[in-house]
């Protein structure tokens, strides 16, 4: 098994503007939903996903493979101590921590208050999140106060926070490009050009 990159490997990289922290991943139970969470993060404009909970190289491989084929610079890493990582991010003041939770304040009210000049870390749970998350978060944000899914909550939040993406420039360097089409599939294979 190849070693998983941790966030430390990424210290020298460009500072990420939008990170998603996935708490409490369970390798078997959350396989598909965690995979979809990363794909949703990438597609809706996040710069990276930080996976925590059980180690799962296959999740990182999926995200890397999609990024290689469909372009852009989406990063993924594994963080064994997510709460220490969040605490240090919070202490540094370099990032705003947004925790998506059904218990939070309505997203339409919160979004205008989230500063745009520094990194945003969007935290989502799977199993019960540690109570401390509510304290560390600068904003506890709900997408409705009914229980649903981390993928749905993330998509709604990112769509509202990031706005429409210019996919051609964001996902530059792709092997495959999908063009919008009213019917059928229109796909450019840049590898064959
Ligand atoms: N039983 C779990 C618990 O105790 O929290 C349910 C977790 S829920 C399936 C997984 C994640 O989805 C939550 O941690 C939260 O990040 C997100 N989520 C679910 N419903 C949400 C809502 N209405 N607003 C915002 N986020 C939500």
Image (spheres, helix red, strand yellow):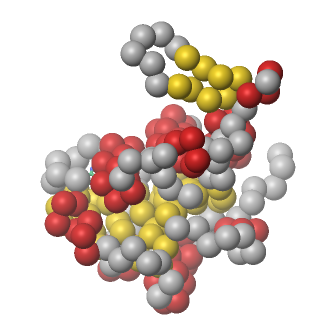
Vertical order, 11 against 76 (above or below): below
Count of number-bearing discs: 0
Left or right of residue 121, residue 9 in this image: right
Q: Which residue is located at x 70 percent, y 65 percent?
A: 6
Image quadrant holding the C terminus, namely top right
Q: Nearer the viewer, residue 157 or 123?
A: 157
Left or right of residue 54, residue 98 in this image: left
Vertical order, 80 against 135 (above or below): above
Q: Horizontal and vertical percent for residue 109?
A: 17, 66
Q: Which residue is located at x 48 percent, y 52 percent?
A: 45
Left or right of residue 193, residue 86 in this image: left
Query: Which residue ends up furthest to the front in the rendered image?
Result: 193
Q: Which residue is located at x 38 percent, y 62 percent?
A: 129
Q: Which residue is located at x 81 percent, y 55 percent?
A: 3
Q: Horizontal and vertical percent for residue 172?
A: 65, 44
Query: Which residue ends up furthest to the right in the rendered image?
Result: 2
Q: Horizontal and vertical percent for residue 141?
A: 26, 64
Can you see residue 96? Answer: yes
Q: Horizontal and vertical percent for residue 15?
A: 62, 72
Q: Quadrant of residue 98?
A: bottom left
Q: Nearer the viewer, residue 135 or 117?
A: 117
Left or right of residue 58, residue 108 in this image: left
Can you see residue 56? Answer: no
């Amino acid at each position: 098994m190849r070693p998983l990159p941790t966030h430390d490997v990424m210290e020298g990289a460009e500072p990420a503007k939008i990170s998603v922290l996935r708490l409490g991943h369970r390798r078997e139970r959350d396989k598909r939903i965690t995979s979809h969470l990363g794909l949703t993060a990438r597609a809706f404009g996040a710069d990276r996903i930080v996976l925590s909970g059980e180690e799962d190289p296959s999740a990182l491989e999926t995200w890397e493979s999609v990024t290689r084929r469909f372009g852009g610079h989406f990063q993924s890493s594994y963080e064994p101590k997510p709460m220490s990582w969040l605490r240090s991010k919070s202490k540094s003041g370099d990032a705003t921590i947004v925790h998506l939770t059904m218990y939070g304040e309505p997203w339409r009210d919160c979004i205008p208050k989230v500063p745009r000049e520094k990194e945003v870390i969007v935290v989502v749970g799977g199993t019960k999140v540690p109570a401390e998350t509510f304290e560390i978060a600068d904003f506890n944000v709900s997408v409705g106060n009914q229980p649903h899914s981390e993928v749905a909550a993330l998509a709604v939040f990112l769509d509202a926070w990031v706005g429409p993406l210019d996919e051609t420039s964001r996902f530059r360097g792709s092997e495959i490009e999908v063009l919008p089409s009213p019917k059928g599939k229109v796909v450019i294979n840049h590898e064959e050009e």
